[in-house]
Amino acid sequence: MITKRSRGEMNHNSTQHKGFMRDTSPWFLEYGYINARLEKETPIFNKQRIDFTPPENINSLVVCSNQLCMSLGKDALLRIDLVKADQPNQADLGRKDEFIVYKMFLDPTGSHLLIALNTSECLYLNRNAQKARFLSRWKGHIIESIGWNKFLGNETSTGPILVGTAQGQIYEAEIFITESSLFGTNPDQYFRYLHTLEEETGPAPVCCLEINRGYENRFCAIATTRKRLFQFAAKITEGNEQHGFAPLFSQPADDLPSIQEFPGNLGYSEIAFYTPKLRTYPTSFAWMMGNGVLYGTLDFSRPDSVLTGVQVWEYPSSTDKPMSIVLTQFHFLLLLPDRIKAICTLNGQVVFEDVFTEKFGPLKRMMKDPVIGQIWIYTERAVFRYHVERESRDVWKMYMNMGKFDLAKEFCKDRPECMDMVLAKEAEHCFHNKKYKESAKCYALTQNYFEEIALKFIEAKQEDALMEFLLKKLSNLKPSEKIQITLLTTWLTELYLNCLGTLESDTSKRSLYLKTRDEFRGFLSSPRNKECLFNNRASIHDLLASHGDTENMVYFAVLIQDYERVVAHHCQHDDYDEALHVLTKHRDEKLFYKFSPVLMQHIPMKVVDSWIMMGKRLDPKNLIPALVNYSQGAGTHINEAIRYMQFCVYELKETEQAIHNYLLSLYAQFRPESLLSYLEIAGTNPNTIYYDLKYALRLCAEHGHHHACVHVYKVMGLYEEAVDLALKVDVDLAKSCADLPADDEELKKKLWLKIARHVVQEEKDVKKAMVCLSSCNLLKIEDILPFFPDFVTIDHFKEAICSSLQAYNQHIEELKQEMEDATLSAKRIREDMQEMRNKYSSVDPQDKCTSCDFPLLNRPFYLFLCGHMFHYDCLMQLVFPNLPAYKQIKLEDLQKKLGAAAQPSKSCSHAKDEDSISLGKRQPSREQIKADIDNIVAAECPYCGELMIRSIDKAFIDPQKYKEEMLSWL
């Protein structure tokens, strides 16, 4: 059984580890980081012996995709799924003759196992089979290597594969398995010859084979012999991969494959590849050959050789020759008879050496699981496994020492202390090579002392690099580091201004000046610096002012939205249009109120246009001072003031009294033709008029606008004053005023008499007086006769007097007719009353109450003209719920009084009579109370009167009694 040992056992089985010593120098003192490690770091290659004692010696072992297969003794084959290590499986090779397992090959999926025998035969064993199958087409060849198809291989088929033999031939074959072929037909589909590898002495064994697919479906096969490395490349049309790799080896004779040859010879060679995760092709290789190890990277896009960056690591002369090689991302491992060595591919140094004891015998072979990445080593009696842990932990330092800083930073992204060392080293390297800006960028990312670096650039007189350093440092600060941000921002502003001042004076550097200015403005407008610049705006303004840079000062003021300073600057330089443009663009009401008086003096029309465009955002009342200051004379200012006031009144529907009063004053002084129309549009209802009536009256009177005064008098309800003033202007105007008091006939008659008197006495026009008489129905000829002089003859009034007498006669006749009609109506009413007294109805003994259906004569009852009859109490039940609340209260009160006025007993009759006599004057009689009750209860029939109509929307059953009523029916 195979199990994992504990960490203690693993360390016990581990041997010496040489090289690969960590640097423990106190570098944190220089770079500002402290590397605190609580426990010793584990080595990169961590060995573990598998707790497994084989029953026989191990002849051969292969592993791939967690599938481990080993040949034991003469004919035993053990298979182990490492995921289920406690369930090993032993397969039957099916051979009884003498043979030795020469080599075993396992495909990348772990499904297909090829077993090469020393008898020039080959067996095949599928993962799902228990018995090996003989491959008849492969007979006669000693198999040295297999080039697996990583693109088409699966659990049932290998796809086309390459087979290398000890005689130097390369064959193409394919193994395909179905459920029926597991027990029947041969699994090998074909086995055909492709090529022969030769050295100077003739054909040589094919030690290794590897097939890869690069860009644009370009395939490349790498094959090695003991001394040579061959490359076969060709493009295979997409979709034809299933047809095999013949195009790689069937190239023209003059297009020979690429060959690498070395003089040394071990008698064998081995090549290893490293394929990163998430990739389908390898990126690096290491070839173990006679003189040493040839290693480098692979570039499948190259048209000739895919090997690039090739280096040779030569074997030390004092050591044994290696037997196997394994390649990882940054190391290749060599297997020696008693140890393994790990050599870093970056610097060629031996960084790890692990010596094995002789307890388990000499080491036989080393291999790597290409899928899982674990390294396996076996002897005849033991199996060891190496875990590769954090192989790239020190790669950054090697790249840093090699000057490959970008690669160094890639491998220490999650280790800030290492990143700081790399950046500091890169900064120093750039500084010494006079790449000051690049050096500044790197220094800004380190933890080195800020003062030292700044002084370093100052001493070197590299202001551009210093600015780059400060900018980068500023971008790396946290928002909470406000003091540092303020310091750097202010310093950078000073440096930019110094630079701009120097460049501005040199006309030959105009383009550089513009570029620097744009950079400075970009710095000022950066969102990251916005808060700091705003909080320290006074200092920045002082700096800009001290350098006399008004252009950038205005730009900065706009950035921080200090528009007051911008507008003031434009006004000081008489650039009023630009000042108004700033105001209009940013729509700040307070700035409009502040600068409008100045702008109104110079560009009144444009200012008013801006006010109108602002609309209701401006309070016109606050703009009146700007208008009043420049409306003392005629001209453009007056017209613009009137235009804006009209906009406020007619467009904005402004109701502020001051606005209307000011517009009224402008009309009265400068545009009297518009005054009366404004007053008429305002209306005649004092409650909906927004100007001050008294102010308007005084203003119109001062400027002699009598028509306007008459209108104001009319609105104020002062009709007599309106008529008096109107008579001085126009009689028709006075007539229109006299008709206004429609509800007060006495006042209306008085006003018309004033007009008549004026016409008769002032104008002495009798005909016009007669027109006045006809215009008012309230005036009679006798009302205006006193106004005429004595010398006027009656001929002028004859017609009027006759009309008046005729009207009087007609009025008398109408009164007579009305008296006759009243007499006739009184007579008819008396007759109806007499008829009602004599009206009666009879009740039969069998008549019943309409409500309760009991005999009617049993109790007091009511009989209505419609024929309905009700007991007193039944009528009360019908009527009372439908009476208004006040009548219900009154009815209850009357019933109480009726009960109190009941007939007394005989013993108390005398006293009661005296009381009734004494109270008779204060309390109603019993008959009166009954009459009042009848007026309420029996005013109308409850079935024929309004009571029934009002109850039409009421439910037949009271909602509160509905449930009780429903239960009564069950």
Image (cartoon, rainbow, N blue to C red):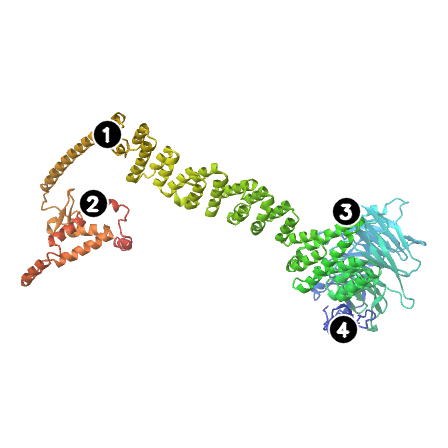
Residue at 92%, 60% (x, y): give it.
265
Q: Secondary structure at mark 4?
A: helix
Q: Amino acid at mark 4?
A: Asn
Q: Nearer the viewer, residue 415 or 768?
A: 768
Residue 415, how many percent across, how many down? Answer: 73, 65
- Label 4, on which residue? 11
Residue 526 left/right relative to 911 = right
- Disc 3 crowd, CA 10 A, few/some/many (<14, 14-19, 20+): few
Res. 242 mark? 3
Q: Amino acid at mark 1?
A: Ser
If you read the primary sequence from the N terminus, does the residue marked by circle 4 or circle 2 appear first? 4
Residue 881 left/right relative to 734 = left
- From the image, state whether disc 4 or disc 2 is nearer to you: 2
- Label 2, on which residue? 943
- From the image, state whether disc 3 or disc 2 is nearer to you: 2
If you read the primary sequence from the N terminus, does the residue marked by circle 1 or circle 2 appear first? 1
- Label 1, on which residue? 804
